[in-house]
């Protein structure tokens, strides 16, 4: 082979490597006949899936250069080994498994993020046993998992001798996410822990498992099923992931995210385990001042000019259709609604002038938690910074 051909081949290889999109596999624990933990009125499998879809939607919306893959995006059963294989086949850079905790102690509460490792406490062992017991629903699980018995402490001895080459990165990611979830929700910080989770064992990339809260705790179960708190949780996980990626960029000296998409998101106001969330009205909605007149029924804003780029402030993603007079919109009459496959999106401040929308976002401050600027051209979502460069 000539030197020219060798150089061409090397250049092609370099291009292939550089074009690899940062890939995140989001795993919604349990599914179908495997309900996971069951609360007084809800099931873990549904809570996990809702959070997973919300998280994936946020990532795809704000960071289109990041590839998002779900192990499941509907109510189906996926074996533990297959969840890991999905991540490995897609050469994922990060595996995030979302779960909901449960305990015989009904007062147990709080958030914790796990990485793979030996269970150093009885409590950690119980969590791992609970999540690993799903393999008992799989056919021929004895041979698939080499005789592993999720209910025997002896089976977990192997984790004492396992060396995870991605351990430090997994812990770093877990730390970022734990911090954001605790700060956002105001719930008890159960810290980052290690335990022998089978779903993490076979992954060949940094991997974490999030326990969002306790479905066995009445107040936490209400919060875990509250749509606005689900969005706040997804936002918090997203911020943790972005912080982790920025940390990778800093240490590796290589950009992963496009500058325009790494927007800072303001954390949602804290929620506490003692305060039961409202079913319809989010915690962050403030009551109108006594001097403020009741909001009139809002009307959809006129359609924006689709011949150019239109900038808007996205203020909400909802799985259900909202009345434009919903208190969450705080009396604004310029609310726009867009139906998409993940639900409904709501915007305000539509303008062909980016500076006007940016000024509105600054003026509103924390009025709409997590609001961010988006751009549309000819009715399709486009990159904000790219659109500004083309003006």
Image (spheres, rainbow, N blue to C red):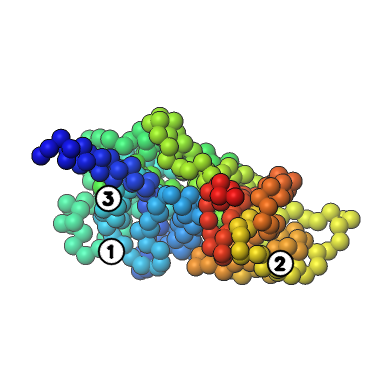
Between the residue at mark 2 and the residue at mark 3, the CA separation in whole angstroms equals 46 Å
Q: Earlier in the sequence, mark 2 or mark 1?
A: 1
In percent of the image, x 66 and y 64: which residue is there?
A: 304
Q: Earlier in the sequence, mark 3 or mark 1?
A: 3
Is the Cβ of the residue at disc 2 closer than 8 Å to that at disc 1? no
For residue 177, above or below residue 329: above
Which residue matches tag 3? 88
Going by the image, does 184 lie left or right of 8?
right
- Residue 350, image x and y in percent? 68, 59
Between the residue at mark 2 and the residue at mark 1, the CA separation in whole angstroms equals 51 Å
From this viewpoint, is residue 213 visible? no
The numbered mark at residue 137 is 1
Q: Earlier in the sequence, mark 2 or mark 3?
A: 3
Question: As rendered, which of 377 and 259 lies closer to the eye?
Answer: 377
- Residue 22, image x and y in percent? 38, 46
Mark toward the viewer: 3 or 1: 3
The image quarter containing residue 264 is: top right
Is the Cβ of the residue at disc 3 closer than 8 Å to that at disc 1? no
Which residue matches tag 2? 301
The numbered mark at residue 205 is none
Local SS, label 2:
loop
Q: Quadrant of the N terminus?
A: top left
In percent of the image, x 21 and y 37: which residue is there?
A: 7
């Amino acid at each position: 082979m000539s030197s020219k051909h060798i150089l061409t081949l090397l250049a092609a290889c370099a291009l292939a490597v550089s074009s690899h999109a940062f890939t995140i596999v989001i795993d919604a624990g349990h599914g179908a006949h495997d309900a996971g933990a069951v609360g007084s009125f809800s099931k873990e499998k549904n809570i996990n899936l809702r959070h997973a879809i919300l998280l994936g939607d946020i990532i795809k919306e704000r960071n289109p250069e990041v590839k998002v893959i779900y192990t499941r995006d509907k109510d189906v059963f996926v074996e533990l080994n297959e969840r890991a294989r999905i991540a490995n086949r897609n050469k994922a850079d990060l595996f995030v498994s979302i779960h909901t905790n449960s305990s015989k102690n009904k007062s147990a509460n709080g958030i914790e993020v796990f990485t793979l490792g030996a269970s150093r406490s009885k409590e950690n062992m119980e969590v791992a046993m609970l999540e690993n017991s799903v393999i008992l629903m799989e056919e021929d699980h004895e041979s698939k998992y080499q005789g592993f018995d999720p209910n025997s402490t002896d089976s977990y001895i192997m984790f004492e001798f396992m060396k995870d080459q991605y351990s430090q990165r997994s812990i770093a990611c877990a730390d970022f996410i734990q911090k954001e979830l605790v700060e956002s929700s105001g719930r008890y910080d159960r810290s980052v822990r290690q335990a022998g989770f089978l779903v993490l064992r076979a992954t060949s990339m940094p991997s974490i498992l999030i326990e969002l809260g306790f479905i066995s705790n009445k107040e936490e179960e209400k919060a875990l099923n509250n749509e606005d708190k689900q969005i706040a949780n997804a936002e918090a996980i997203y911020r943790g992931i972005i912080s982790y990626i920025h940390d990778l960029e800093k240490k590796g000296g290589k950009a992963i995210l496009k500058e325009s998409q790494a927007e800072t998101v303001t954390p949602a106001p804290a929620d506490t385990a003692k305060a039961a969330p409202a079913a319809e009205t989010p915690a962050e909605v403030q009551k109108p001042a006594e001097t403020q007149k009741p909001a009139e029924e809002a009307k959809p804003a006129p359609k924006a000019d689709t011949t150019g780029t239109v900038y808007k402030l996205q203020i909400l993603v909802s799985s259900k259709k909202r009345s434009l007079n919903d208190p969450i919109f705080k009396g604004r009459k310029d609310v726009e609604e867009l139906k998409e496959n993940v639900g409904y999106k709501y915007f305000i401040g539509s303008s062909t002038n980016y500076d006007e929308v940016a000024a509105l976002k600054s003026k509103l401050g924390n009025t709409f938690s997590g609001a961010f600027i988006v751009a549309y051209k000819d009715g399709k979502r486009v990159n904000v910074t790219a659109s500004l460069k083309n003006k």
